[in-house]
Structures are given as structure tokens and as C-alpha cells.
Image: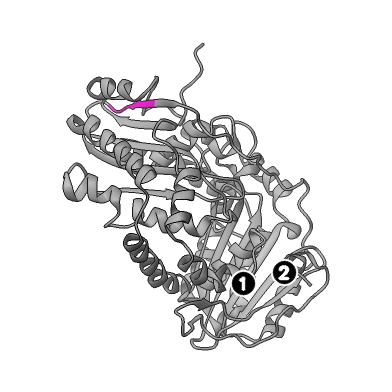
């Protein structure tokens, strides 16, 4: 039976029934995913159970397929508000009682939304496994949707956006970047919403989203920790096995189209003493066959403190306190982006240097010594991503969500070691954008950086006080 078949098998199907050990390094320095059991309930809920008895703790992670892709048109942020409301009263507990139940047990429970899923994470002592499962089941199956709690979370979401605009817009430049790069595509819609779309969302919208996009057939549950798999499986089947299916089909996104040429969005923040910039184009998806080579190369280009990008913009020139680059991988290709900030009067110099650094990486590539350094760095960092029960539960969710098998972890070291200069040049040419083809966002005092923006490419302007992340169409 193939790994992919195991995710969709109906009835309880045991793929592995082995008491798991912590992730461990082999003699060659690789990391292996501990053994786990995979099962699918009759309603489509997928279970991933990994026993790990070194500490009396259990971590549980949940993904509900759909996420912000299911937000109604013009009401971005609906999934995010739903995620927040799952913690604001469920079952027989009010918001305060729900929080108190978590806190009294010394546990942790939180929820959030992404583009393609709503996630929930919980961590409790093993003795409180029943409480943890009950709270998670209440949150997902029996949210209370109290009107007063909805009003609070919606207001707080809008206030958080306004506060970031008023103080440090670095927290939002990715929202502007995605909106500018992916305009007209679902990935361009802000997961957390905008001030405008949040104001349009009603409690009925959230309830409708819940009915249409949250259900047992969308559910993936991973549990890692101090338990016996057969007993945990029975508990989860009782709690979630009878849950109804979501009323609507799972929403999906098509592959976005790369930007040709340059286009610049200038977001005016009068009085700003710094300019914040984001340079991006469509990159790669989560299952891209060259994703490991991309990570190795990005480590050298902009993925660590000693990267080429940070060395040029911070260490050598002192233009910024930090510059980085990275891939946002989703089911379809997300963005590859470069971001940094600089003093207003140094805007042109900093962006020119970032573009020149990108050009140099693409034209020169990286030699064997540099690649060896990046390989060593990634192999040293990777085990720390699988240290805790929560890390492992999250990784199991990731594998199930994207249809990947344990080899994604087990063969990681082998894939990293295989990245040579030829592979690096290949991904630089295919996954890293040319400096001539970029969506660019600049946030700063437009009166002072407008000329710098015009040097980059055709400019469209908006105000940071505008209640959305993309300029309005001319009336």
C-alpha cells in the first residue's frame, strides 16, 4: 500500500503500530521520524498517533482543510475570526470558563487560520488527556459563537492592524507584498483581513463559514506523547468520529502567474524616518522537487545572519539592522521575497544594493565551500525542528496535509548533501526571480522616497491609512 493511499483509507487502518522513540540522528547525521500510527475514521477524519514516553506530556495538533480560501468575497478574515472564536466559549463553558479550564490544568491551547487551513494546537499533561480532547472537541464541534465575544475579537483584529500601521509596519509589509504580487488570486487576500473587510463581517458570516468549511471530512488530528495508541484512537473516535461533514467542497487555488517586469506599490506613511521594502515574485510550492536545494541556496543568499544579503546590507554597508529572504510554500507556489528597511535618505542605495546582490547570486552562483557551509548549517538546525512533542505533531500534520510520507524527514539529510554547485545554479535560475521581474512594495514618507520608487519601475500609490492592503480602483 502506498503512503498516499493510507491517508484516504476508510475505517480504522493501522499503518504502523510501533512504540515511537524520539527523533534521532543516525551515524551519517540524518534524522528519522519516529514510528507512528495512521488511521482514518468513517467520516474522513485522519488520525496520526505517535507514542513518546520520555515525558508525561501530550501535544495535539489539528488542521481543518480550507482556511482563508473559504472566506466570502469581500470578507477576508472570516476564517481567522472563526479560529479566534473557538477559544472564546465552547460546549458548556463560557469564554472565561474555557480559558480557566486550560489554565488550571497548566495546559496550552490556541488556534489560528492560514491560507489553506485552520489550525489548533494543544499541550497538556498526560493525566489531563481527557480534558484536552474534550476542550478541542468542544472548540471544533460546539463553539458557542457568543455575540459579545465576536464583537471583541473583530474589534481587536482591526485595532491590531491599525496599531501596526501606526508604529512599525514591518509586521504588515508581507500583507502588502502578497496583495500586490497576487492581486486577483486567492493568495493575495489577507488571512487576518483588513480594516475594511473585518468591518463587513457579521457573526452570521462566521456561522455560515463554519457550516460550509468545517467538518469531520476536513479534519486531520496528530497526537504525540505519553499515551497508548489504541486507547487514544478510541478516545478520538468517540470525540470526533460522529462529526458531520462540511457542507461545501474544499476550496482550492490555481497556480499563480509570475510577474513579468517590475511594478511598484508606494504606501505613503507621512513623517516616517525609515523606508521599508519588500521585493518578490512567485516562488515554489511545498512539494517542489527542488525545495531542499532552494533551502540550501536561500540559506546562503538571505536565510541566516551571515547570508550574502545581510552581509551586504547590514554588516558591510550598515544600511539596515537586518535583511532576509525566504520562500512561502503552500499547495501552490507562494512568494519568494526579500525584505529589509533603511533610513529614508538611504532608500535608493539600499534597494539598489539588494537588487545587485540578487543579480550577483544568480550570475555567479555559490562555490563548493559556501555550499558546504550551508549544508552543515541546515543539518545542524534540522534536528531542533523535531525536538518536542509539539514539533513532531506539527510535522505529522504537515506531511498529511501535503500528501508527503516519512521520507520527507528521513531523507532530508541525503537531499541536503546532494545539493552541489550545479543544483544551486539550477534553482537560482528557476526559483529565484530575476531583478528585472519583481513586485515591489515601499512603505515610507512618499514625499521623500517617491523619486527612489520611480527609479525602480512604474509606481502606484496608496496611503497607509487606507483600510485595505491594495489600492482602490479609480472611480
Residue 262, picture quadrant: top left
Residue at x 24% of width, y 20% of height: 447
| Residues marked 1 and 2 touching at CB (< 8 Å) | yes
> Percent from the top left, x then y, of residue 410?
56, 74
Quadrant including the N terminus: bottom right
Q: Nearer the viewer, residue 287 or 230?
A: 287
Range shown magenta:
265-269
Q: Is residue 335 positioned above or below 127 on the image?
A: above
Secondary structure under badge 2?
A: helix
> Percent from the top left, x then y, of residue 359?
35, 39
Residue 406: image tag: 1
Residue at x 38% of width, y 32% of height: 441
Residue density around tag 1, few if under 14, some if 14–19, many if 20 or more, within 10 Å? some
> Percent from the top left, x then y, of residue 318?
16, 45
- Identify the mark nearer the N-term, 1 or 2: 2
Is residue 197 in view?
A: yes
Is residue 273 in view?
A: no
> Percent from the top left, x then y, of residue 139?
62, 61
* Main SS, magenta residues: strand
Residue 161: image tag: none
Q: Nearer the viewer, residue 417 or 409?
A: 417
Residue at x 76% of width, y 69% of height: 2
* Residue at mark 1 to residue at mark 2: CA–CA distance: 9 Å
Q: Nearer the viewer, residue 228 or 381?
A: 381
Q: Going by the image, does 245 lie left or right of 187? A: right
Residue 3: image tag: 2
Q: Going by the image, does 231 lie left or right of 377? A: right
Query: Is residue 396 located in the magenta-colored stretch of the structure?
Result: no
Amino acid at each position: 500500500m502506498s503512503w498516499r493511499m493510507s491517508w484516504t483509507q476508510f475505517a480504522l487502518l493501522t499503518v504502523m503500530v510501533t512504540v515511537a522513540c524520539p527523533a534521532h540522528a543516525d551515524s551519517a547525521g540524518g534524522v528519522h521520524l519516529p514510528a507512528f500510527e495512521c488511521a482514518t475514521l468513517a467520516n474522513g477524519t485522519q488520525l496520526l498517533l505517535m507514542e513518546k514516553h520520555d515525558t508525561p506530556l501530550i501535544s495535539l495538533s489539528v488542521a481543518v482543510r480550507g482556511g482563508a480560501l473559504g472566506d466570502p468575497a469581500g470578507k477576508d478574515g472570516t476564517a481567522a475570526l472563526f479560529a479566534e472564536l473557538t477559544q472564546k466559549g465552547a460546549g458548556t463553558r463560557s469564554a472565561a470558563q474555557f480559558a480557566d479550564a486550560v489554565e488550571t490544568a497548566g495546559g496550552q491551547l490556541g488556534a489560528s487560520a492560514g491560507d489553506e487551513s485552520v489550525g489548533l494546537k494543544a499541550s497538556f499533561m498526560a493525566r489531563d488527556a481527557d480534558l484536552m480532547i474534550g476542550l478541542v472537541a468542544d472548540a471544533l464541534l460546539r463553539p458557542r459563537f457568543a455575540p459579545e465575544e465576536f464583537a471583541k475579537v473583530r474589534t481587536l483584529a482591526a485595532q491590531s492592524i491599525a496599531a501596526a500601521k501606526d508604529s512599525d509596519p514591518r509586521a504588515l509589509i508581507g500583507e502588502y507584498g502578497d496583495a500586490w504580487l497576487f492581486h486577483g488570486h486567492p493568495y493575495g487576500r489577507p488571512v487576518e483581513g483588513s480594516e475594511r473587510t473585518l468591518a463587513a463581517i457579521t457573526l452570521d458570516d462566521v456561522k455560515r463559514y463554519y457550516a460550509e468549511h468545517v467538518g469531520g471530512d476536513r479534519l486531520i488530528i496528530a497526537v504525540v506523547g505519553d499515551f497508548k495508541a489504541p486507547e487514544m484512537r478510541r478516545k478520538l473516535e468517540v470525540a470526533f468520529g460522529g462529526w458531520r461533514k462540511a457542507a461545501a467542497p474544499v476550496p482550492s487555488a490555481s497556480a499563480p502567474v509570475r510577474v513579468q517586469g517590475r511594478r511598484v506599490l508606494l504606501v505613503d506613511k507621512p513623517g516616517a524616518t525609515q523606508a521599508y521594502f519588500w521585493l518578490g515574485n512567485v516562488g515554489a510550492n511545498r512539494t517542489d522537487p527542488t525545495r531542499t536545494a532552494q533551502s540550501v541556496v536561500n540559506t546562503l543568499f538571505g536565510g541566516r545572519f551571515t547570508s550574502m544579503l545581510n552581509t551586504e546590507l547590514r554588516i558591510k554597508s550598515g544600511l539596515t539592522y537586518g535583511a532576509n529572504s525566504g520562500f512561502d510554500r503552500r499547495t501552490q507556489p507562494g512568494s519568494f521575497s526579500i525584505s529589509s528597511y533603511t533610513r529614508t535618505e538611504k532608500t535608493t542605495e539600499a534597494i539598489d544594493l539588494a537588487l545587485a546582490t540578487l543579480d550577483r547570486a544568480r550570475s555567479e552562483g555559490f562555490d563548493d565551500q559556501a555550499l558546504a557551509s550551508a549544508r552543515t548549517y541546515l543539518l545542524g538546525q534540522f534536528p531542533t525542528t523535531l525536538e518536542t512533542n509539539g514539533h513532531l505533531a506539527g510535522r505529522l500534520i504537515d506531511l498529511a496535509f501535503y500528501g508527503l510520507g516519512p521520507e520527507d524527514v528521513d531523507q532530508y539529510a541525503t537531499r541536503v548533501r546532494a545539493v552541489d554547485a550545479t543544483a544551486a545554479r539550477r534553482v537560482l535560475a528557476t526559483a529565484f526571480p530575476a531583478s528585472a521581474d519583481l513586485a515591489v512594495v515601499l512603505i515610507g514618507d512618499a514625499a521623500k522616497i517617491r523619486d527612489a520608487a520611480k527609479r525602480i519601475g512604474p509606481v502606484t500609490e496608496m496611503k497607509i491609512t487606507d483600510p485595505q492592503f491594495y489600492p482602490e480602483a479609480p472611480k
